[in-house]
Image (cartoon, rainbow, N blue to C red):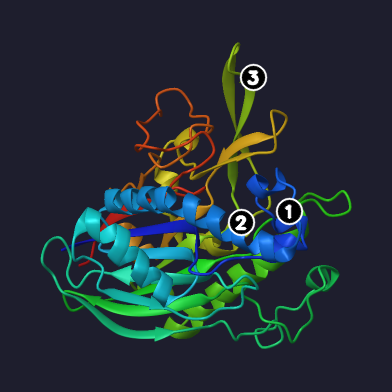
């Protein structure tokens, strides 16, 4: 029997307004920065109007991207709460796929903005096999001290032993697919952030993501036993906010772009991929065609990279030796630079920078569950 599994960072699926931009310009949308606003009351009214005007097109594109994954189970990141998820599924996704994702799960994690990980599931696969929810376990409470992960590098980032490891959560969900067990770990690791004191944001925040990856590995090993994990059926899905490769973009639109694959020596992914603990299925695609996000800070800094992952246990990897994930890129804005031969037809109303389905691309794969 087969299961279609996907992961997607849906980018701020919120059901509340964020007014923090009035006092913190870093949080202020660029639209409102164009106008002279006399006081906070006026700011709040304008922010409501802006958010509502921008949201409808974006969520139509988000729903189109999810529908294209054809997923039976989809792990999602940046979901405000279960009410936001229900409203999106009913108001937007239902129009694309009908009565599909009746099972929805999320918990309140540690993110200061309130964005959490979530999982939506159909009641049965496309093949008609039942999808049965068994249990859900949050690991948002785990501290560095509890897992013995405190280090000088973490201390240098300002993190203390008593603080929680996961910036959101590692949401563990057990299901049965046609009676066969599968454990899903849904994650969203610490973002890279901006440069700090001349240190690139990715390097400055690396110790936090490495600790998160070590904690996920520890949770899986504690669950199944170190000597048994390879033979069990589990997956890790989510936005790791890190990469092992980049496709660096040079040149320009007039003279033409060039694309160079650059390997990175340090990555939090190394923790989970070392010694064959897990396999990154997207690495079965050509190197230049693994990207799920376009990053730019202007013409001097542009690259494509994989931030979104479906990592599988060795036994699942062996049972699915021919499985190659799909990456849905039709919801990308027009500013995204595609390598030759990878261009796609964008969804209707996709804009130069926005609206878009998300800044990330969904990743989906069909797995045999034997």
The residue under the point 46% across, 54% down is 55
Q: Indicate which disc, 1 or 3, sits on the residue closer to the N terminus.
A: 1
The residue under the point 75% across, 61% down is 39
Would you say the residues marked 2 and 1 are in contact, meaning their CB atoms lie under 8 Å apart? Answer: yes
The residue tagged with tag 3: helix, strand or loop? Answer: strand
Up/down of 138 relative to 20, above or below: below
- Picture coordinates of residue 355, whole percent (x, y): 47, 43
Q: Quadrant of the N terminus?
A: bottom left
Q: Indicate which disc, 3 or 2, sits on the residue closer to the N terminus.
A: 2
- Picture coordinates of residue 327, whole percent (x, y): 38, 45
Neighbourhood count class around disc 3 (C-alpha, 10 Å): few under 14, some 14–19, many 20 upward: few
Look at discs 1 and 3 and give the one toward the viewer. Answer: 1
Residue 230 visible:
no
User: Which mark is drawn over residue 46?
Assistant: 2
* Residue 345, image quadrant: top left
Gap in angstroms between the C-alphas marked 2 and 1: 9 Å
* Residue 205, image quadrant: bottom right
* Residue that carries the numbered disc 3 in the rendered image: 251
């Amino acid at each position: 029997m087969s299961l279609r599994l996907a992961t997607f960072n849906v980018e701020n699926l919120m059901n509340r307004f964020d007014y923090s931009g009035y006092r913190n310009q870093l949080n202020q949308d660029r639209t409102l920065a164009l106008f002279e606003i006399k006081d906070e009351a006026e700011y709040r009214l304008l922010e409501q109007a802006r958010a509502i005007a921008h949201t409808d097109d974006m969520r139509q594109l988000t729903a189109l991207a999810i529908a294209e994954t054809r997923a039976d189970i989809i792990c999602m990141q940046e979901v405000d709460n279960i009410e936001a998820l229900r409203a999106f599924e009913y108001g937007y996704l239902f129009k694309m796929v009908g009565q599909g994702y009746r099972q929805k799960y999320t918990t309140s994690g540690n993110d200061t903005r309130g964005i959490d990980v979530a999982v939506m599931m159909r009641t049965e696969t496309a093949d008609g096999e039942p999808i049965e929810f068994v249990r859900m376990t949050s690991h948002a409470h785990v501290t560095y001290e509890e897992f013995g992960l405190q280090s000088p590098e973490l201390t240098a980032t300002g993190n203390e032993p008593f603080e929680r490891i996961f910036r959101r959560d590692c949401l563990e969900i057990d299901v049965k697919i046609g009676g066969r067990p599968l454990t899903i770990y849904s994650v969203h690791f610490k973002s890279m952030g901006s440069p700090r004191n001349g240190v690139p944001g990715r390097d400055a925040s690396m110790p936090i993501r490495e600790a998160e990856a070590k904690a996920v590995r520890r949770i899986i090993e504690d669950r199944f036993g170190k000597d048994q994990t390879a033979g069990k059926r589990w997956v890790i899905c989510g936005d790791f906010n890190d990469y092992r490769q980049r496709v660096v973009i040079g040149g320009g639109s007039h003279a033409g772009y060039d694309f160079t694959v650059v390997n990175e020596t340090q990555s939090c992914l190394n923790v989970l991929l070392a010694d064959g603990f897990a396999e990154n299925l997207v690495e079965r695609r050509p190197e230049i065609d693994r990207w799920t996000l376009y990053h730019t800070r202007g013409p001097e800094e542009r690259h494509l990279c994989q931030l979104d992952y479906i990592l599988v246990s060795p036994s699942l990897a062996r049972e699915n030796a021919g499985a190659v994930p799909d990456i849905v890129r039709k919801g990308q804005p027009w500013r995204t630079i595609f390598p030759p031969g990878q261009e796609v037809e964008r969804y209707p109303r996709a804009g130069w920078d926005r609206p878009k389905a998300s800044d990330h691309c969904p990743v989906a794969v069909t797995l045999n569950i034997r």
